[in-house]
Image (cartoon, grey):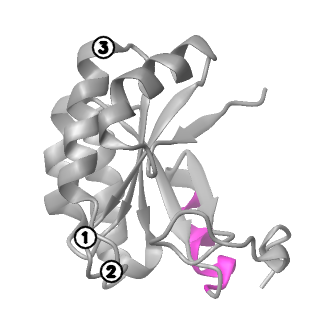
Amino acid sequence: MVEISTSILNVEKEKATQVFYDLEVAHTDYFHIDIMDGKFVPSNTKEQMLEYTNSIKQISNVPLDAHFMVENVKEEIDKYIPFEPNIITFHYEATKNKEEIMELINYIKQNNIKVGISVKPDTQVEKIYEFLPYIHMVLIMTVEPGKGGQKLIRSNIRKDR
């Protein structure tokens, strides 16, 4: 089954409510929330995404797909747990070690949320193999994280490096 998770990263603030409504009417399966801190990636969307998430939860029952592109993953996750996202995805590269990855996986699952791990275009996918039995999704970036509208890195469609 194909599911669509629609990014709201580039939604204009004054049009946000209408866009969220239109996406729900179009039967998007998830609202994809791109949380960036200006450190792990150059852009900072923390306040905007928190505001959009709050709005969505007030007007829609479409599940949330939260993608964290941040250095302090747990701190940011704590802000979203009350919104009960369907899935939380964090970047392998934002963690210090394997123990932290497993702590994050367990923490997210303890809150009844599915877990995803994302890898940047230049990260070898083998680095996350050992975590596959514990997670629900892998997000392989086909652009450098942190900015919408980038050109697709075609070599990452088939990620075998």
Query: How far, Cα to Cα, is label 2 from label 3?
Result: 31 Å
- How many residues crowd mark 2 within 10 Å: few (<14), some (14–19), many (20+)? some
Q: Identify the residue position indicated by label 1 in the image.
A: 37
142 lies above or below 27: below
Are the residues at dot 1 and dot 2 in contact (C-beta closer than 8 Å)? yes
**Helix, strand or loop at mark 2:** loop
User: Residue 155 appears in which quarter of the rendering?
Assistant: bottom right
Q: Position of residue 68 (x, y in %)?
A: 36, 60
Q: Which residues are magenta?
A: 123-132
Q: Is residue 151 left or right of residue 78?
A: right
Mark nearest the camera among 2 and 3 is 3
Q: Is residue 98 left or right of residue 82?
A: right
Closer to us: 90 or 152: 152
The quarter of the picture where the N terminus appears is top right
**Helix, strand or loop at mark 1:** loop
Q: Residue at 52% of width from left, 30% of height from top?
A: 30
Q: Residue at 27% of width from left, 62% of height from top?
A: 103
Q: Residue at 44% of width from left, 69% of height from top?
A: 91
Q: Identify the residue position indicated by label 3 in the image.
A: 59
Mark toward the start of the polypeptide (2 vs 3): 2
90 lies above or below 31: below
As for residue 129 lying within the magenta part, the answer is yes
Q: Identify the residue position indicated by label 2 in the image.
A: 40
